[in-house]
Image: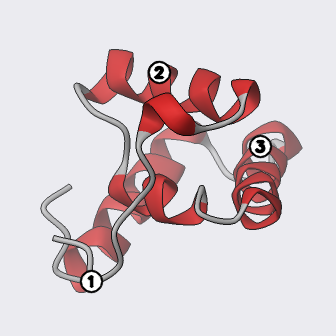
């Protein structure tokens, strides 16, 4: 459980809603960290830009990205 409450996905701008809906479709619910980031749209867009940049750079294979994400989540006690 996040120490900071996230946003209500129904009360965000269109861009944020689209991202959260895609996460719900993929993982069954929006990711908690994104709900917290969305409290500040500029931070949300910055975080999304970072992940998009990593994904499109071609520097890190998608499978390795997934493994790194899960390892970091595990280290942080996330129930990813």
Question: Alpha-carbon neighbours of circle 1 within 10 Å: few (<14), some, or many (≥20)?
Answer: few
Determine whether 18 is above or below 58 in the image.
above
Task: Give the residue number, with chain letter if any, for mark 1.
Answer: 3
The reply to whether dot 1 and dot 3 touch (C-beta < 8 Å) is no
Q: In the figure, residue 68 lies in which quadrant? A: bottom left
Q: Residue 31 in the image: x percent, y percent?
A: 37, 47
- Check disc 3: other Cα within 10 Å, few if <14, some if 14-19, many if 20+: few
Q: Badge 2, how many Cα within 10 Å: few under 14, some, many 20+?
A: some
* Quarter of the figure that contains the N terminus: bottom left
Left or right: where 31 falls relative to 19: left
1 vs 3, front mark: 1
Helix, strand or loop at disc 2? helix
User: x and y percent of residue 46 in the render?
Assistant: 81, 61
Relative to the observer, which residue lies in front, 21 or 52?
21
User: Is 29 or 76 nearer to us in this picture?
Assistant: 29
The CA span between labels 1 and 2 is 23 Å
Q: Which mark is residue 21?
A: 2
In the image: residue 53, left or right of residue 51: right
C-alpha separation, residue under disc 1 versus residue under disc 3: 26 Å
| Mark 1 / mark 3, whichever is N-terminal | 1
Residue at the image position 61 percent from the left and 38 percent from the top: 12
Q: Nearest to the eye among marks 2 and 3: give it.
A: 2
Residue at 47% in and 41% down: 63
The secondary element bearing badge 1 is classed as loop
Q: Residue at x 62, y 21 (%)?
A: 18
Q: How is colour applied across the structure in the image?
A: secondary structure
Find residue 61 and report its image quarter: top right
- Judging depth in this view, the residue of 8 and 67 nearest the camera is 8
Q: Where is residue 64 drawn, in percent x and y?
A: 49, 51
Q: Earlier in the sequence, mark 2 or mark 3?
A: 2
The residue identified by callout 3 is 52
């Amino acid at each position: 459980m996040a120490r900071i409450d996230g946003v209500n996905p129904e009360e965000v701008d269109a861009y944020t809603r689209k991202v959260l809906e895609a996460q719900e479709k993929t993982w069954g619910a929006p990711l908690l960290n994104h709900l917290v980031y969305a409290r500040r749209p500029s931070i949300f867009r910055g975080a999304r830009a970072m992940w998009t940049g990593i994904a499109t750079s071609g520097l890190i294979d998608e499978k390795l990205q997934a493994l790194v994400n899960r390892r970091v989540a595990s280290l942080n006690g996330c129930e990813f």
